[in-house]
Structures are given as structure tokens and as C-alpha cells.
Image (cartoon, rainbow, N blue to C red):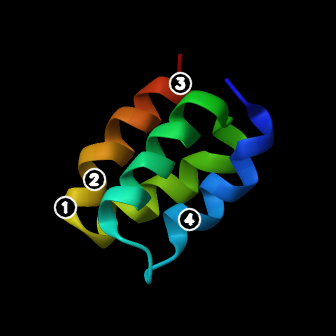
Amino acid sequence: RTPEALPEARRISEDRTEHIILRKAAIFAIGRLGNPADDSDRLKGLSKEHHRLAQAANPALEQLSK
């Protein structure tokens, strides 16, 4: 739980030039460290971008809602 990593995780998650595995790891971190107000729309958009990103974004959305 390193909240300082959240801005970088957000950047990586949306960077289409990054490897998809790294983006999925960043999405996981957002689910753990983020908040619904700032990250729900981001995660919903990522889940629509690619089915592999949805594998991380959907559980991250669930985590945010807890």
C-alpha cells in the first residue's frame, strides 16, 4: 500500500504504448489504492478498450466499491 504510486499507476494504465501485462498490473494497483470518484470512469473505459484489460479493470472496480 504505497499511495505515492497511484499517479504513476494511472498513467501506465492509460498508456497504450505500455505492455498490456504492465497495464493490467497498474489497473490492479488502482483497484487497491484508488478511489471511486477519481477512478471508476477510468476503469470502465479501460474495460471497454480491450478484453484483457477488462480482466483487471472489472475486479478493480469491485475492489473500489468496497
Q: Earlier in the sequence, mark 2 or mark 3?
A: 2
Considering every residue shown, the one lying at the far bottom of the view is: 17
- Tell me the element at label 1: helix
Q: Which residue in the structure is indicated by mark 4? A: 12
Considering every residue shown, the one lying at the far left of the view is: 51
Amino acid residing under circle 2: Ala
- Tell me the element at label 2: helix
Q: Alpha carbon of mark 2 to alpha carbon of mark 4: how far?
A: 15 Å
Provide residue 38's location: percent of width, then percent of height: 71, 48
> Circles 2 and 1: CB distance less than 8 Å?
yes
- Tell me the element at label 3: loop
Provide residue 7's location: percent of width, then percent of height: 74, 54
Q: Which residue in the structure is indicated by mark 3? A: 65
Q: Alpha carbon of mark 2 to alpha carbon of mark 1: how far?
A: 5 Å
Q: Earlier in the sequence, mark 4 or mark 1?
A: 4
Q: Alpha carbon of mark 3 to alpha carbon of mark 4: how far?
A: 22 Å
Q: Which residue in the structure is indicated by mark 1? A: 51
Circle count: 4
Amino acid residing under circle 4: Ile
Which numbered dot is residue 54? 2
